[in-house]
């Protein structure tokens, strides 16, 4: 399980990802609660959550840029941008000038870049580690975000309660800066390679757009990649909105909790995800990565359905924990399936395409906000879950040769595209 840490670049990336993930989770929880309390609107909360993923539309361009200028260079540039935006919010909080509108503007700017961070994270792991360590490495890398959701949720609420918004943002800015410094230490030649092309800017743009078109065709022509893409879109559209965007509403209106109660719910979901990541970190999937992601997705929607009808706090915490476990067992093997079915030269672009699936999350959030205002949380969440389960079952049958067959490359162990 610890084999990937023998690789120098992976050690620095893991530490940098950990610091960044802690900062992100603290920030999202603190600002989500701030927007809900200050505005009193579930629709505005949904908009705030959706803005964090607006950049999924341009993620393929980041993938192309990573293939051309070097993954690590683009990686640390985005980390520096996060630190700058957090510094702006720190200044506004210090001057007592922070408003929901200011939060939404900064969320928009961060959301343009943040979805593409996962593009670089997965692509760098694939470049650094040998193929036989890929599943384990991705599982360990996932631990960074899962542990951050636990620690960030609890630390964010407790820091605001004890010291106020300003000192909470001092911690967040410090974590972003630490992430930037650590990410700068990834020195592998394979990861930092730069394509030196003497073509002018117009030719570079034409070439980049050509690369993007090639990536679309590449994914479309491979059933294993297309099936994984649609599953990623589906869980973002119908499963994630109630855990990543609307959890402050659930805490306040379903369970009657405050900000510290919200942190407990967020930590429960993250704890389940952490358990899944630790299981995947053992690098042992006896039934194949694609089968695991499909079964986990169906389980996830069933748990979501039960959570939609639950009004007892302890039951909700247990269901959130199992939902986090199912999400980890779904999404980490999904990334491995896509990397496994992709040739090395296309990995950055394909993982950029993968991030387009995140666009399902803002769509799901923006739809859920007004629907909840009209029909209530239980009805909307139940409809989302039932629809998600039915569509996942249909996808399993439709792409059974590419995703369910034991002989499919997506279910073979330790094979990657050449």
Image (tube, grey):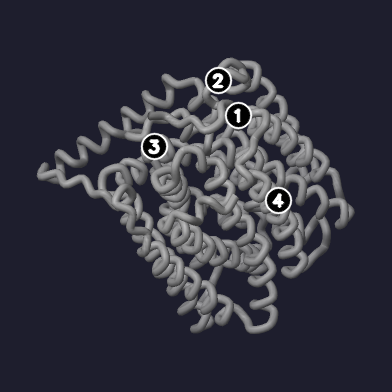
In front: 368, or 273? 273
- C-alpha separation, residue under disc 1 versus residue under disc 4: 19 Å
In front: 111, or 406? 406
The secondary structure type at the circle numbered 4 is: helix
| Residue shown at the point (30%, 42%) measured from the top left | 67
In the rendering, which numbered label is found on residue 408? 2
Residue under label 4, please give it: 275
Residue 11: where, in percent of width, then height? 47, 59
In the rendering, which numbered label is found on residue 290? 1
Answer with the quarter of the image where residue 23 lies.
bottom right
Question: Which mark is first along the chain, 3 or 1?
Answer: 1
Question: Which mark is first along the chain, 3 or 4?
Answer: 4
The answer to whether residue 403 is left or right of residue 63 is right
**Residue 206 showing in the rendered view:** yes
Q: How crowded is mark 3: few (under 14 residues within 10 Å), some or many (20 or more)?
A: many
- C-alpha separation, residue under disc 4 versus residue under disc 2: 27 Å
The answer to whether residue 99 is left or right of residue 319 is left
**Marks 2 and 1 in Cβ contact (< 8 Å):** yes
| Residue shown at the point (68%, 34%) measured from the top left | 297
- C-alpha separation, residue under disc 4 versus residue under disc 3: 28 Å
The answer to whether residue 299 is left or right of residue 342 is right
Does 277 appear above or below 173?
A: above
Answer with the quarter of the image where residue 349 lies.
top left
């Amino acid at each position: 399980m610890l084999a990937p840490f023998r690789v120098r670049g992976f050690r620095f990336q893991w530490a940098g990802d950990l610091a960044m993930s802690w900062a992100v989770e603290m920030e999202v929880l603190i600002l989500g609660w701030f927007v809900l309390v200050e505005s009193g609107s579930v629709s505005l909360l949904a908009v705030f959550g959706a803005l964090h993923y607006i950049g999924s539309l341009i993620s393929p361009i980041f993938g192309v840029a990573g293939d051309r200028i070097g993954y690590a260079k683009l990686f640390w540039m985005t980390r520096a941008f996060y630190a700058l935006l957090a510094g702006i919010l720190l200044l506004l909080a210090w001057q007592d000038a922070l408003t929901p509108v200011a939060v939404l503007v900064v969320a928009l700017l961060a959301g343009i870049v943040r979805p593409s961070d996962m593009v670089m994270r997965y692509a760098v792991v694939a470049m650094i580690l040998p193929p036989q360590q890929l599943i384990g490495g991705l599982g360990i890398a996932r631990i960074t975000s899962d542990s951050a959701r636990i620690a960030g949720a609890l630390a964010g609420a407790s820091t605001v309660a004890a010291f106020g918004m300003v000192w909470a943002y001092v911690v967040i800015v410090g974590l972003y800066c630490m992430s930037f410094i650590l990410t700068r230490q990834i020195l592998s030649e394979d990861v930092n390679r730069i394509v030196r092309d003497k073509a002018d800017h117009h030719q570079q743009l034409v070439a980049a757009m050509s690369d993007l078109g090639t990536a679309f065709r590449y994914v479309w022509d491979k059933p294993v990649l297309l099936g994984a893409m649609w599953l990623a879109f589906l869980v973002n559209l119908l499963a994630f909105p109630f855990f990543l965007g609307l959890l402050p509403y659930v805490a306040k209106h379903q369970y009657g909790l405050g900000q510290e109660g919200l942190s407990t719910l967020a930590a429960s979901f993250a704890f389940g995800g952490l358990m899944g990541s630790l299981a995947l970190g053992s690098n042992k999937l006896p039934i194949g990565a694609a089968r695991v992601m499909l079964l986990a997705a169906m389980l996830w929607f069933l748990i979501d359905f039960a959570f939609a009808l639950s009004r007892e706090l302890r039951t909700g915490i247990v269901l959130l924990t199992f939902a986090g476990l199912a999400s980890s067992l779904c999404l980490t093997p999904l990334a491995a399936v896509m990397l496994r079915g992709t040739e090395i030269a296309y990995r950055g672009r394909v993982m950029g395409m993968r991030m387009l699936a995140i666009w399902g999350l803002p769509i799901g959030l923006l739809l859920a906000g007004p629907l909840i205002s009209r029909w209530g949380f239980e009805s909307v969440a139940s409809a989302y879950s039932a629809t998600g389960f039915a569509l996942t079952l249909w996808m399993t049958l439709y792409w059974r040769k590419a995703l369910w067959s034991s002989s499919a490359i997506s279910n073979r162990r330790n094979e990657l595209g050449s």
